[in-house]
Image (tube, grey):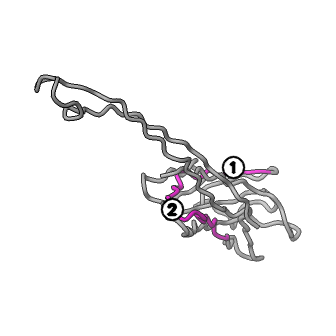
């Protein structure tokens, strides 16, 4: 399921244009006359959808987890959006630890996970993309892939909220 978000911005531009040839006959050739020109553009509205949930699935006997992609779709017919940052925050007593941690020897039920995207380990903080690195063109979709690991549990867990991932999106 996806949530629909909108970003709306209104741009108003005022410029002064030099207009020496607008007035004929009575002004000196050296005269400078200006006329204000107002330009108003309609509001720019870019709608996009983003995955509501990322699912992390582990198999008994291994620390490796399968993590679904974060899918961002620009539903607009014109304009780009840009993913600027990703932040992961652990929830419900879980902790995000380094992907190089020794998951095989962690205590069962220690509630530790790793989360990595584009080579960035979220145990080190926020992932900031370079300018124009993660552009989503009009009517296009960008997938951001993740990998992760988790510690052993004493009982199977069918579902649990272990972390929130927040994406910062801007109009490019």
Disc 1 target residue: 89
Q: Which numbered marker is on residue 78?
A: 2
The percent coordinates of residue 23 (x first, y second) are 22, 30
State the CA–CA distance, disc 2 to disc 1: 33 Å
Viewer-proximal residue among 154 and 13:
13
Residue drawn at (62%, 53%) of the image: 167
Query: What range is drawn magenta here?
Result: 68-91
- Specify the quadrant of the image occupied by residue 149: bottom right
Magenta stretch: includes residue 31: no
Residue 64 is left or right of residue 14, and the answer is right
Mark earlier in primary sequence (2, 1): 2
Residue drawn at (56%, 57%) of the image: 121
| Foreground disc of the pair 2, 1 | 2
Residue drawn at (42%, 52%) of the image: 131
Magenta stretch: includes residue 87: yes
Viewer-proximal residue among 49 and 127:
49
Q: Quadrant of the N terminus?
A: bottom right
Q: Could you classify mark 2 by the number of other residues whose Cα lies within 10 Å: few (under 14), some (14-19), or many (20 or more)?
A: few
């Amino acid at each position: 399921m996806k949530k629909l978000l909108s970003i709306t911005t209104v741009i108003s531009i005022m410029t002064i244009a030099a207009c020496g040839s607008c007035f004929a006959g009575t002004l000196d050739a050296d005269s400078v006359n200006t006329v204000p020109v107002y330009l108003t553009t309609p509001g720019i509205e870019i709608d996009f959808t983003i995955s509501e949930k990322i699912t992390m699935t582990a198999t008994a006997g291994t620390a490796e987890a399968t993590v679904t992609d974060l899918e961002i779709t620009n539903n607009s017919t014109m304009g780009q959006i840009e993913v600027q940052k990703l932040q992961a925050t652990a929830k419900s007593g879980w902790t995000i630890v380094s992907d190089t941690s020794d998951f095989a020897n962690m205590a069962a039920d220690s509630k530790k996970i790793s989360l990595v995207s584009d080579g960035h380990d979220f145990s080190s903080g926020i992932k900031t993309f370079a300018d124009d690195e993660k552009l989503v063109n009009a009517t296009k979709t960008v997938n951001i892939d993740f990998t992760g690991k988790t510690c052993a549990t004493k009982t199977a867990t069918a579902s649990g909220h272990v972390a929130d991932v927040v994406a910062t999106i801007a109009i490019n």
